[in-house]
Image (cartoon, rainbow, N blue to C red):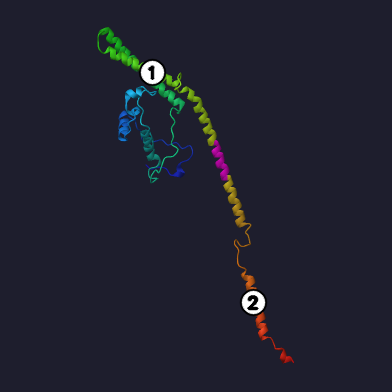
Amino acid sequence: MSGLWFEDLTEGLVVEHATRRTVTETDNVLFTTMTMNPAPLHLDHAYAATTEFGRPLVNSMFTLALVVGLSVPELTLGTIVAQLGLTDFRTRESMIDPALLAETVLKTITALSLQVVEAGAQRDLLRHTSASSPQISPLTSRITALQAQIDRERGSLAGTEASFAPKVAEYERLVLLRDFAVRNFLASLTSLESARLEALHQRAYLERVVQPRAADRPAYPYRVVWVLVVFGVGMLAWRMFRPSDARYR
């Protein structure tokens, strides 16, 4: 398996990566601790539960490294010596695909609701079989915590200032601006290419059809000097070898 060259990277190319990777909590903890990152948002479940996310987040640097690593076999393996740098890599919090985010949140709500139902069924069974069981209180606390998390997930879609719904309009506006920018960029590239071809055409016309006869730089008038030298030498020779006037007297 080898990567692609620059000429192979055409516009609209979709590369299917054969390698797949499931990110686990161990991966996140291992990477975060190896890079000496003490942020509790990546490690502390109790702290993360008090945030708008409700759970620890995977270290973004691990996500970046993983995405780059998975792309190597089909993109850069054997075609570059080293990746000198990553430019224009930018993420903006909460500004992602609306459809994808909504789908993820709904799946999370569904999974949490199933956990609430299971915990409620266990609690009701214990109340009927053993009303004094010590497991009833932890189950009740778990149901309350799960219900609070469900409410936070629902609030992330609509209903609060930090929800996702108010940002959809800005997302759509940015997408529209991006589309216009891409079209303007392509039009500018077309105009630039046309101007380059026209300049090459005019240059070829000047070089091949209208060749200048004058010198490109000032030159010393050797021809005029040689004509004067020859004329002077001739006059001198005529003066020296012409017949004397005394012979004819």
- Give the main secondary structure of the magenta stretch: helix
Give amino acid for label 2.
Val
SS category of the residue bearing label 2: helix
Dividing the picture into quadrants, the one containing residue 73 is: top left
Looking at marks 1 and 2 on the same chain, the residue that comes earlier in the sequence is marked by 1
- Residue at image mark 1: 150
Give amino acid for label 1.
Ile
**Depth check, front residue: 6 or 181:** 181
Whether residue 113 is visible here, answered yes or no, is no
Residue 138 position in % (x across, y down): 28, 15
Residue 139 position in % (x across, y down): 30, 14
Quick check: 168 left or right of 248? left
Whether residue 172 is visible here, answered yes or no, is yes
Q: Are marks 1 and 2 in contact (CB under 8 Å)?
A: no
**Depth check, front residue: 185 or 145:** 145
Which residue shows up at 43% across the image and 25% down it? 101
Vertical relation: 230 (above or below) 39:
below
**Depth check, front residue: 216 or 199:** 216
Mark 1: few, some, or many residues within 10 Å (few <14, many ≥20)?
A: many
Residue 227 position in % (x across, y down): 65, 74
Mark 2: few, some, or many residues within 10 Å (few <14, many ≥20)?
A: few
Quick check: 205 left or right of 149? right
- Residue at image mark 2: 230
